[in-house]
Image: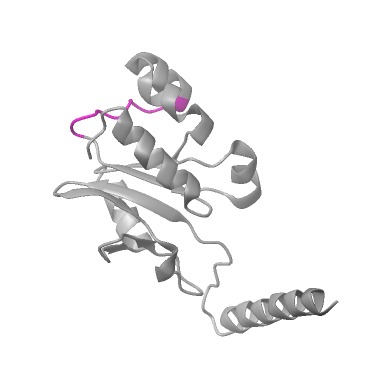
Amino acid sequence: MAKVYTKLTRFTLLLQAQRMFMSNGVVSAPRYYHASIASPGYPFMQATSSQRRIGQRFYCTHDQRDLTPLQVKTLLEEKSIYLIDVREPAELTEEGKINGSINVPLGQLVEALSIHDEDFAIRYGVAQPDKENTNLVFYCKGGVRSNHAMKTAISLGYNR
């Protein structure tokens, strides 16, 4: 019974902290996205959960290069990245998605990155990423799938 009480207490404290942040005008993000990042001049980098902060979403790399939501937005506007959401479609309807991202569930990633360019465009509504010149950013709910997606892309010959 003590374990249940402890879990309920921690959950209650989390809710209270979120309400406090929300009441002070700070948007509280109860869920964090994890990104595996590939960009010019940098090797593929694995985001870690150690940089998570209450009320903010950070896209962090192992060498401490952080991408804030504003930086991701800027990169999307400049069309210098493909932001690929590797969550399942049901999660998108439940939790939403980042505008400008492409949903390619992890289970379909190998097929998606291997199909003909025209088929990719028909299925996902955008041109297929180029293996040599496209910067890929993968994200998911907790980081495990984006890490796997990054490794999959590398194994398929994507190098940015």
Tell me if I can see residue 101 in this picture.
no
> Could you say which quadrant of the image residue 118 lies in?
top left
Q: Is 154 placed left or right of 115 in the picture?
A: left
Q: Farthest residue to the right: give it.
A: 1
Q: Farthest residue to the front: give it.
A: 2
> Could you say which quadrant of the image residue 2 lies in?
bottom right
Quadrant of the rendering where the N terminus is positioned: bottom right
Q: Main secondary structure of the magenta part?
A: loop
Can you give x and y, in whole percent of width and height, for residue 50 in the image?
42, 69
Can you give x and y, in whole percent of width and height, for residue 71 in the image?
30, 59
Q: Is residue 19 above or below residue 108?
A: below
Q: Which residues, given as a range, are shown in magenta?
A: 124-133
Q: Residue at x 26, y 28 (%)?
A: 157
Q: Residue at x 41, y 46 (%)?
A: 147
Quadrant of the rendering where the C terminus is positioned: top left
Q: Residue at x 40, y 21 (%)?
A: 120
Q: Out of 160 and 118, give the one closest to the viewer.
A: 160
Q: How is the image coloured?
A: one colour
Q: Is residue 86 magenta?
A: no
Q: Is 43 placed left or right of 51 in the picture?
A: left
Can you give x and y, in whole percent of width and height, for residue 6 in the image?
75, 79
Q: Is 72 placed left or right of 144 in the picture?
A: left
> Could you say which quadrant of the image residue 116 lies in?
top left
Q: Is residue 32 above or below residue 92?
A: below
**Count of residue discs:** 0
Q: Out of 8 and 81, give the one closest to the viewer.
A: 8
Q: Out of 114 and 91, give the one closest to the viewer.
A: 114
Tell me if I can see residue 108 in this picture.
yes
Q: Farthest residue to the left: give it.
A: 41
